[in-house]
Image: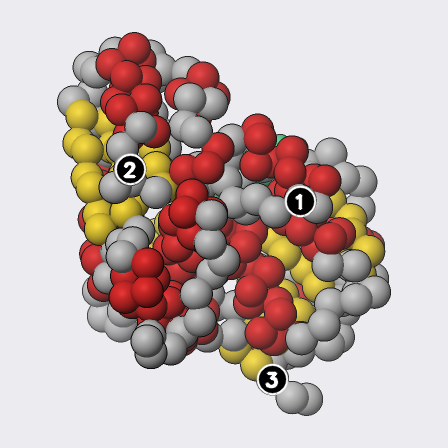
Amino acid sequence: MTRARIIDGKAIAAKIRNHIALKTATLAQKHGITPGLAVILVGENMASQTYVRNKARATTAVGMESFGHLLPEETTQENLIALVHKLNADARVHGILVQLPLPGHMNEAAVLAEVTPEKDVDGFHFANVGKLVLGLPCLPPCTPSGILALLKETLGNLDGLRALVIGRSNIVGKPLSIMLTNENCTVTLAHSKTRNIAAECARADIIVSAVGKPEFLRGEWIKPGATVIDVGINHVLVPEDAGGDGEKKKLVGDVCFNEALDVAKAITPVPGGVGPMTIAMLLENTLKAACMQAGISLPEEDPQP
Ligand code: NAP
């Protein structure tokens, strides 16, 4: 039996970042615009600090400006919103990202609603979500955009394919189901109340799992030849390598990877699949936002006069 092709999200994301860097250079040369991304982090969540650092590094690496705003845990929602308003009005800032989760005393939805939709590079504002549903130009959410880019790179045209999305979060599953519908897939959106996930998997040409349960999707559920995108990020403890009696932390996805390898046509690994695509799409949204705010179309890659 042929083993599944492993979809290299790292390499695909690197290629996209290269294209973005070339377009960013053209934008600066032809229009004198350097896209700027402001990232706000409230508190000292270790994982969030790492995400924010990685985003800042990726932003400057493609020639964009990065503005970091680190606020203490006890910041009031009023002060956070005042900063968002200041960044909404700052012409050097084309994209604003409020790193989630926010501390418990804040209402995330209320804060996100204050980011002007034109600078909402996370694509979480209800104005962007509404436009996505209506098929209008918008800033789409980054992880679903990254998944769609992986699917197009792997399968080309998605017309008529049966897609199963497992997980209905507002940041991944729900918007992805809309995007796949807009790409002419026939979409099923499954969740914890879905009666028979295995049966839903058995008829899907594309399975995207965004559940957050280690290795819950079994190889035997997958239709032979299907393409599987594993969004899950799960930290599990596994025995130390040979000899040791301790345990070490390991990152696994939602899919039993080794089982799926024998059935699927293509599959994303965890790590190295969807994860790297999310930041690439954030940069793409920042470039798009800068162009939209200047009233120009996305530049070509060639920065010739
Ligand atoms: P979430 O808000 O945690 O929601 C999980 C979804 O899974 C819910 O819709 C839930 O159903 C569904 N679910 C739970 N148990 C299920 C089961 N046994 N069968 C079917 N569906 C089930 O999800 P999220 O924020 O989208 O995150 C999902 C995973 O993706 C996490 O591991 C997260 O870390 C990862 N993630 C990765 C990236 C990346 O860039 N790689 C980005 C975002 C998220 P109900 O709605 O019925 O509760």
What residue is shown at x 79% (from left), y 66% (from top)? 159
**Can you tell which mark lies on residue 136?**
1
**Residue 213 appears in view:** no
Q: Is residue 260 left or right of residue 252?
A: right
Q: Is 40 rendered above or below residue 106? A: below
Q: CA distance from mark 3 to mark 1?
A: 39 Å
**Can you tell which mark lies on residue 257?**
none
Q: Is 228 rendered above or below residue 66? A: below
Q: CA distance from mark 2 to mark 3?
A: 51 Å
**Residue 203 appears in view:** yes
Residue labelled with disc 2: 91
Please state, as top left, top right, bottom left or bottom right, where the C terminus lies in the image.
bottom left
Disc 3 element: loop
Q: Nearer the viewer, residue 167 or 245?
A: 167
Inspect the image, locate mark 1, and give the three-letter code of the amino acid beneath it.
Leu
Q: Nearer the viewer, residue 219 or 206?
A: 206
Q: Nearer the viewer, residue 174 or 85?
A: 85
What residue is shown at x 34% (from left), y 42% (from top)? 94
